Amino acid sequence: MSLVSSNNKKVFLSTNTKITSIEKVDIILSPELYWVRIFDIPVKNITYARHVLPTLFEDILSDISELSYQVIKLGDNKYLCFAYINKTIYEAIKKSGISLALVDSVYFAQNECKNLEEFSFDNKSFLYTLDNILIKVPSSIALNSVDLNEHINKLELSSNKVDIKLYNNVLSTKQFYSILAIILCVCVINIYKVYDYKAEINELDKQIQIEKNLSNLPSSMLQVTSILNKYKSIANKDIQKRDFLEYLLSNKTFKLNKINLNKNIVTLNFKNSDKVRVEKFILKKYKIISSRAKALNIEVQVKL
């Protein structure tokens, strides 16, 4: 097991531990904050071993839904396996009073206290069993324990840091999978809608093609658009003529004798009307091209 050099202050984190520090610290986790076992697993490497750990710890723990795992290979098919709850360790660090910003690395006491067969800390006793697993024991059993506070800064830390997230998991695993299921359902519905819309668009395209065939319209949309623009222009001219006539007829004092519509030029013939009043009324909204009086009649040409 390789060692790492660190000048950080070393602290042992147990339940209810209080830590006061204004410098960077390396935290060593008490066995109270994780589970550790040695398993014989017939696989070649750590990656494969990690895959079967949930099943192995399921025989020991009633709920493994929030567990994270780490593995150290000890020999052929023999692995030192850790299980821990990220949230539990996170809460223990916060409760201790240490600022999360000051935490450099986190370690399992299992790997870091091997030079101390028995030790005590904060009125709690710990010792290594015959199979080399560090456990918490009653003080009456650990008769030869030493005070960890006197030796902790002499410990040589290993390279086996705990892979921990120093923030609170807002969502539980169950909640995460529930949200994931909802998102999946929404995606499925959206995919269905996309196909449904495509089907509707295809049906509309078929109806448009049928209407084109019935109306003898060209198949090219460019040609159809050109035809529509042409008739739109004609329709706009007719609307302009209608609006002009509606405006003209709104004045009941004029005696309109004749109307001649020629493209955008309208020729009007008034009988027994005041030329000045007629011109003034028309010029409010339209442009007069010419105006002349013939005996008792007035002829006015208006451009729409």
Image: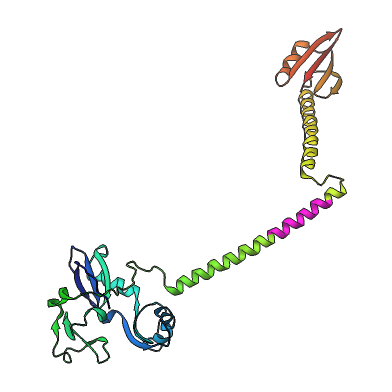
Display coloring: rainbow
Q: Is residue 97 visible?
A: no
Residue at left offset 71%, top offset 21%: 285
Q: From the image, give the main secondary structure of the stretch colored magenta.
A: helix
Q: Is residue 137 left or right of residue 217?
A: left
Residue at left offset 81%, top offset 9%: 292
Question: What is the magenta range?
Answer: 197-210
Judging depth in this view, the residue of 185 and 130 nearest the camera is: 130
Judging depth in this view, the residue of 220 and 241 nearest the camera is: 220
Residue lying furthest top: 295
Residue 294: x and y in percent read 86, 8
Q: Is residue 197 left or right of residue 260?
A: left
Residue 200: x and y in percent read 73, 58
Image quadrant containing the C terminus: top right
Above or below for 124 versus 188: below
Above or below for 81 versus 97: below
Number of numbered discs overlaid on the protein picture: 0
Image quadrant containing the N terminus: bottom left
Which image quadrant is residue 23 in? bottom left
Above or below for 102 versus 39: above
Which image quadrant is residue 276 in? top right
Residue lying furthest left: 150
Above or below for 54 versus 229: below
Residue 188: x and y in percent read 60, 67
Q: Is residue 31 left or right of residue 202?
A: left
Residue at left offset 73%, top offset 20%: 286
Which image quadrant is residue 43 in? bottom left
